[in-house]
């Protein structure tokens, strides 16, 4: 982590799990095919999804592995992932473990692929990178999956107004203060970067980058946008305490003022896949 007083605690996403899958924008279509091609996935091997949340990435990839293990410290996220696996008929191919990545190897064995779906920045990166390197088979892959940065998609011609993200941010700041909240602490400088240097120091080779193009039009409802707000660490439900209901009422009023139909248009972000490899011998 960067020089900061912030320390991880188990309230980071407290209460967010029921909102996560609905609220977060989906990865770009074609992600699964791109990873299958890049990693030569054939239905065998083992995947570990680090910071799996409700199984967003793991469940999409599970059919490409013999076994998938999802790891997350939030019990609500693990419960959502288990429900999702059952609904997709994947219970026999998946395992969900409530633990922090810093606790690895935790007796989980070795893997052919380790995936991080926008989660590595919450971890002790040096410690986790070394642990994952030792858990991967020779030539195994670490796949870092995230929304592509610095994109700006035009919204001209779409049928509904855009999501009023700036106004939502101002509302959250009025309720929770101007400094970004994170669990019981704050992150005035945001989460750390520098993943590439960390992984190189840990002995990974690469990287190979691939962008899966987004830009596809999406329609979002007020409920979807409310779910997005509550899915974020800096506006997780617990942060509002007894005034959560008041905040949600004000948020919904803001959204209806922005769109009389209660519907919004936006575009999927592109997805960036960064693939690192362990040495083959």
Image (cartoon, helix red, strand yellow):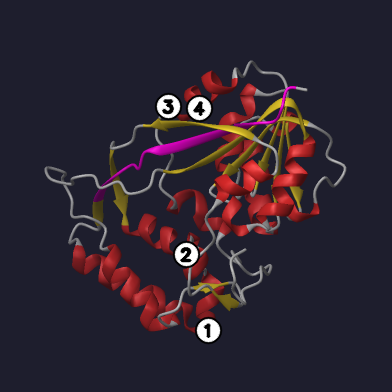
Residue 120, percent from left and from top: 60, 51
Where 127 sits versus 148, above or below? Answer: below
- Please tell me whether mark 2 or mark 1 is closer to you in this view: 2
Marks 3/1: CA–CA distance? 42 Å
Which of the two discs, 2 and 4, sits closer to the camera? 4
Q: In which quarter of the image is the N terminus?
A: bottom right
Quadrant where the C terminus sits is top right
Q: Nearer the viewer, residue 65 or 147?
A: 147
Q: Say if 243 sits above or below 153 in the image.
A: below
Q: Earlier in the sequence, mark 4 or mark 1?
A: 4
- CB-based contact (under 8 Å), mark 2 and mark 1: no
The residue indicated by pointer 2 is 230
> Disc 3 or 2, which lies upstream in sequence?
3
Main secondary-structure element of the magenta-colored stretch = strand
Q: Mark 3 points at which residue?
A: 30
Calculate the distance from the C-alpha at mark 3 to the C-alpha at mark 2: 27 Å
Query: Does the magenta run of residues contain 272?
Result: yes
- Identify the secondary structure beneath mark 4: helix
**How far is mark 3 from mark 4, CA to CA?**
6 Å
Of callouts 2 and 1, which one flags the residue occurring earlier in the amino acid sequence? 2
Q: Where does label 1 land, which residue?
A: 242
Confirm whether residue 250 shows in the render: no
Which residue is tagged 4?
Answer: 32
**Which circle, 4 or 1, is nearer the viewer?**
4
Q: Is mark 2 on a helix, strand or loop?
A: helix
Q: Residue at x 49, y 69 (%)?
A: 234
Magenta segment boundaries in residue numbering = 265-280
């Amino acid at each position: 982590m960067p020089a900061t007083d912030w320390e991880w605690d188990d309230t980071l996403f407290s209460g967010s799990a029921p909102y996560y899958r609905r609220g977060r924008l989906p990865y770009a279509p074609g992600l699964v095919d791109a990873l299958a091609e890049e990693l030569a996935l054939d239905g065998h091997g083992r995947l570990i999804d680090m910071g799996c949340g409700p199984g967003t990435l793991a469940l999409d990839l599970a059919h490409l592995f013999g076994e998938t293990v999802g790891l997350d410290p939030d019990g609500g996220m693990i419960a959502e992932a288990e429900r999702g696996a059952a609904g997709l008929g994947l219970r026999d191919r998946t395992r969900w473990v409530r633990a922090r990545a810093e606790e690895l190897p935790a007796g989980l064995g070795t893997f052919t692929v380790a995936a991080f779906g926008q989660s590595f920045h919450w971890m002790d990166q040096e410690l986790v990178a070394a642990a994952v390197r030792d858990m991967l088979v020779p030539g195994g892959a670490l796949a870092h999956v995230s929304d592509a940065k610095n994109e700006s998609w035009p919204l001209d011609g779409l049928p509904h107004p855009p999501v009023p993200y700036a106004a939502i941010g101002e509302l959250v700041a009025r309720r929770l203060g101007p400094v970004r909240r994170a669990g019981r602490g704050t992150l005035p400088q945001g989460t750390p970067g520098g993943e590439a240097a960390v992984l190189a120091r840990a002995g990974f080779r690469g990287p190979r980058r691939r962008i899966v193009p987004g830009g596809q039009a999406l329609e979002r409802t007020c409920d979807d946008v409310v779910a997005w707000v509550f899915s974020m660490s800096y506006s997780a439900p617990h942060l509002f305490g007894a005034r959560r209901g008041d905040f949600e009422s004000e948020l919904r009023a803001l959204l209806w003022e922005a769109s009389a139909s209660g519907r919004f248009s936006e575009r999927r972000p592109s997805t960036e896949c960064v693939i690192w490899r362990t040495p083959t011998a």
